[in-house]
Amino acid sequence: MSTSLLRLFLVLSLALAFMPLASRADEAKVEPSAPPLSEEYLEKWTPGGNRNDPGLPYPHVTAPFQAEDDDDWRDGRWQLTQKGPAVAHSILLPDYEVGPKVTAVDAGGGTWLLYDLEAGSFVAAVTGGELRTDEARFGMLNRPLLVGDVAFYVPAERAWRKTLADAAIDRASIDHQGRYLNDERVLLATTVDGVEVLESPLPCDAAGVVVREMEVGAHDAPLWLSIATADEAEVLDEIIDGGR
């Protein structure tokens, strides 16, 4: 088996197959924001020591912070933090379902990509976007929100497949190895069914274009990777065959 790596460049453009996604985003121009916090929800997370039960034979002994209301718990320092080119977190992407273990990678120029650690691939990207955090509870209560024009999206369960286009790879066979940083460029390493896959987004000056660079290790059977959805039903696939 050859030990050479198959180098694959995937260029994803809003101007081509992803027009349905773009039009869908244009239809709902309501500025996304974190969902409001209900009183019932806040009750679960707010100490209640300042409200003494009249039936108790003695009053509660409370610390000063227990008498504070929710406005006292808002803090914007997490928003002001220089987070670098990658943020590992549970992240919300409006109108799309993404997994709980993702890494948001800043490719520059407002382009962000979401890498699903369990899927072993980038599953979404936005252009003209930003990663927003909320001030509630010191910025730790609500998940960060990735907003922008969705350039591509792939359901995590359709990312990698082998041999046949519909033969899914077991999640147990996908093992994320780590994230590496070279200057401002982020590289993610994962083994997919025993095959090493290195992937990194590249900066691109063209508006609405997302560039992904991949290196796939030698393998003895075809691998299939879904790179985008053109609409609700259609999935665009790339066969990665070779290295034998």
Image (cartoon, grey):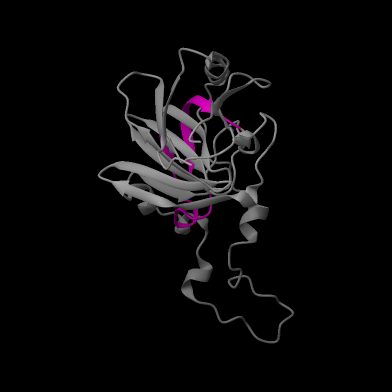
133 drawn magenta: yes
Q: Residue at x 52, y 32 (%)?
A: 32
Q: Residue furthest bottom?
A: 57
Residue at image point 68% right, 21% down = 233
Confirm whether the magenta stretch covers residue 181. Answer: no
Q: Nearer the viewer, residue 171 or 162?
A: 162
Where residue 92 sits in the image (x, y, percent)?
54, 40
In the image, residue 206 sits, relative to residue 177, either above or below, namely above
Q: Residue at x 30, y 22 (%)?
A: 205
Q: Position of residue 213 (x, y in %)?
A: 39, 32
Q: Is residue 159 placed above or below 12 in the rendered structure?
A: below
> Whole-percent x and y of residue 52?
65, 74
Question: Furthest residue to the left?
Answer: 183
Q: Position of residue 138 (x, y in %)?
A: 44, 57
Q: Is residue 33 visible?
A: no
Image position of 60 (left or right of 212): right
Q: How many marks?
A: 0
**Residue 129 is drawn in which quadrant?**
top left
Q: In this rendered view, identify the residue nearer to me: 129 or 228.
A: 228
Residue in the image at 50% along x and 28% along y:
31
Residue furthest out toward the front: 1
Question: Residue 1, can we see it?
Answer: yes
Q: Is residue 3 above or below residue 51?
A: above
- Highlighted magenta segment, given as a residue range: 130-154
- Left or right position of 130 against 237: left
